[in-house]
Image: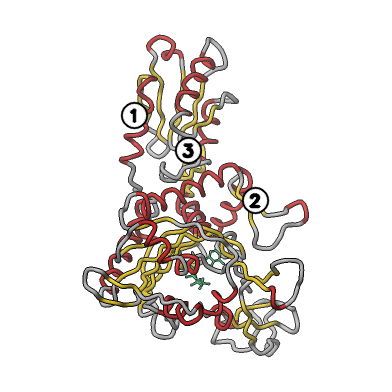
Amino acid sequence: MATIDKLMDKLVSLCKRRGFIFQSSEIYGGLNSCYDYGPLGVELKRNVKEFWWKAMVQSRDDIEGLDASILMHPRVWEASGHVANFTDPMVDCKICKGRFRADELNDKKPGQCPRCGNKDSLTEARQFNLMFKTFMGPVEDAANVVYMRPETAQGIYVNVYNVMQASRQKIPFGIAQIGKAFRNEITPGNFTFRTREFEQMEMQFFVKPGTDMEWFEYWKTQRMAWYDELGIRKSKLRFHQHGPKELAHYAAAAFDIEYEFPFGWKELEGVHNRTDFDLKRHMEYSGKDLNHFDDATREKYIPYIIETSAGCDRTVLTALIDAYDEDVIEGEARTVLRLAPAIAPIKAGVFPLVKKDGMPEVATKIHHELKKHFNVFYDDGGAIGRRYRRMDEAGTPFGITVDGQTLQDQTVTVRERDSLVQTRVAADKVVPFMQEKMAAYRRE
Ligand code: ATP
């Protein structure tokens, strides 16, 4: 792996150069902590979302999908506790005007500014609510305040019985959702790790009280296994259990799945046992009976909720960091993204060895054929080695080259990004060849 201290700089510059991630509104000097996904980035992000959706919704019989609106009734956020409690303690430095989260300061140096180093320059901590507010309709007064949702979960809770009835699900069952969330973070940073606008991939699983810890353990295992399937190295992942001080007021148990980022072990996803807190609160604030009545056992109860809450942008960043590698091939340095084929933005590059002898025509035909199955990229510019390198840097797992022999026997070479093995494959067998390799892929 590349040296740790330079890794983030190298990745940020690769993301811009190759069109994964740009700073938002760059020509105006950028907008702090907001990012745009370019042509390769948008493919990668869509693939991550699809990988999650397949695992959490489409491959299961007990989870339904949902896409709730970002703006919700303001009472939702009173019931959820966000209006009263979704705050971070904020301090300012009176000298350098830096702004920090009090809970992230160095305990050993109380009162000392972490930026300018001045002692006793920090203000008292003030609680700062992280929700973005806006107004619904033309009048900007308190009666018309609405919030940009700070999490997608509440849209699921308020819809639980709508979904249950429409889909004829029975408890235990889950509802999954991918969507934007907004938090006015005091200290965003580390590229897309912490931003003020981001996407979450959340699943809420509704269970009978008493079975909750069993389901909690089940989802911990499932979710850790998902990152392995995504191609993230196992050695870089771990669980972190919330101690009594960290545990949110609603949670009976909570584990974070953490990744070892170049800036330390940090949360990727939270798996929480939220008990019956959420539905009880919505019952209280909405006045609607949110008890579940089990026809089979004649029991009435408020379901407990096991939540798996992952950040989509944070997963994309993790996949990029984990995939970034540098090696030397035949004396030449190469940068390569070892992305799992399932999430790689481009699955194959198609290259005519030279721009003559009918090779571009054959390669174009193969390119169009492959496009029916995968996102592939045609490139006839420059030496073949350079074209391979460009695809390595984009994380493309296969390079397909049309050469002199292709014109004789209709075979092409398929070069694999990680092993560099080149195999001659009949042109009309490239699709099954790639499909087989992709299905068998396992990160080393
Ligand atoms: P933190 O303590 O880091 O602020 P959190 O515990 O509040 O995070 P959750 O509310 O559990 O985070 O959110 C679930 C997931 O959403 C996180 O694991 C993370 O992947 C993602 N997430 C949360 N906040 C942000 C953010 N500001 N930017 C990007 N992703 C985020």
Which is closer to the viewer, label 1 or label 2? 1
**Spot occupied by residue 332 in the image (x, y as percentages of width and height):** 51, 37
**Spot occupied by residue 8 in the image (x, y as percentages of width and height):** 56, 57
What residue do we see at 34% from left, 42% from top? 441
Residues at marks 3 and 1, CA–CA distance in whole angstroms: 17 Å
Viewer-closest of 395 and 372: 372
Q: Is residue 241 visible from the viewing direction of this image?
A: no
**Spot occupied by residue 249 in the image (x, y as percentages of width and height):** 44, 83
Sequence-wise, the earlier of marks 2 and 3 is 2
Residue 277 lies, with reference to residue 341, above or below; the image says below
Residues at marks 2 and 3, CA–CA distance in whole angstroms: 20 Å
Q: Is 206 positioned to the left or the right of 77 in the image?
A: left
Which is closer to the viewer, label 3 or label 1? 1
| Residue behind mark 3 | 396
- Ligand 1: does it lie within 8 Å of the C-beta at label 3? no
| Mark 1 nearby-residue class (10 Å; few <14, some 14–19, many ≥20) | few
Q: Is 288 positioned to the left or the right of 82 in the image?
A: left
Sequence-wise, the earlier of marks 3 and 1 is 3
| Residue behind mark 2 | 22
What residue do we see at 33% from left, 63% from top? 173
What residue do we see at 69% from left, 82% from top? 92
| Residue behind mark 1 | 432
Q: Secondary structure at mark 3?
A: loop
Residues at marks 1 and 2, CA–CA distance in whole angstroms: 35 Å
What residue do we see at 47% from left, 48% from top? 325
Q: Hey, what amino acid is under mark 1?
A: Pro
